[in-house]
Amino acid sequence: MDDSLPGDSLSDLSDLSQDSLADDGPDDTPAGGVTDDGPEPEEMYPGGPEVEVELRPQRRLRIWQLAPIVGLAAVGSLMFAFPLAFDFGDSGAVIAMLGLLICSCAAGWGMMAARRVGYTWPGLPPRGSGRRPDWRVVLAYVLLVALVVVLAVWRVARLR
């Protein structure tokens, strides 16, 4: 009984080394030497054109952006409120006006930061939409700010 397997001898190994390797590429190569490596765009998206999706997260105000704004607003509010509430004498009006100024700066800084990430005031169109704001909404905001400023200045003027 012969226990040898076919191709087990040294002569069979020498026959293998003489065989040429099989070509794995396409049978016909174009003149430029480059072949297409996949389906055409029409075959990849049979339902219509390619749709781009934004992969970045939605922009939001972060805590490091909000902390200084809230801190300045709180300090300004306290500087404005304490002289008004406890009547600190002659320097109370100056401290109150400085507090109003700091509080107003913090409010402006907060509005600019919110605008930068895409937030808008209620009733106003989003940034970059091309729409014009309604003049009644703008007038309402202007009147509201003017009323707050007049009341603040009137109260500080009464300290003297």
Image: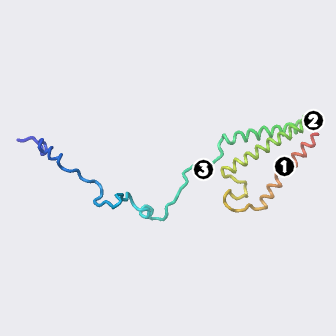
**Chain-order first, disc 2 or disc 3:** 3
Crowd band around label 3 with a 10 angstrom C-alpha radius: few (<14), some (14–19), many (20+): few
Amino acid type, callout 2: Asp
The location of residue 151, given as percent across then percent down, is 88, 48
**Chain-order first, disc 1 or disc 2:** 2
Q: Which residue is mark 2?
A: 90
The residue lying at 33 percent from left, 61 percent from top is: 31
Looking at the rendered image, the disc whose residue lies closer to the viewer, 1 or 2, is: 2
24 vs 64, nearest the viewer: 24
Mark 1 falls on what kind of element?
helix
Tally of numbered tags: 3
Q: Quadrant of residue 128?
A: bottom right
The location of residue 39, given as percent across then percent down, is 39, 60
Among all residues in the image, which is located at the extreme right? 160
Q: Which residue is mark 3?
A: 58
Say which quadrant the N terminus sits in: top left
Mark 2 falls on what kind of element?
helix
Question: How far separated are the C-alphas under marks 2 and 3?
Answer: 50 Å
**Left or right placement of residue 74 versus residue 40 in this view:** right
**Left or right placement of residue 20 versus residue 83 in this view:** left
Say which quadrant the C terminus sits in: top right
Amino acid type, callout 1: Val
How is the rendered protein coloured? Answer: rainbow
Q: Which residue is mark 1?
A: 148
The residue lying at 6 percent from left, 41 percent from top is: 2
Crowd band around label 1 with a 10 angstrom C-alpha radius: few (<14), some (14–19), many (20+): few
Amino acid type, callout 3: Gln
Among all residues in the image, which is located at the extreme left? 1
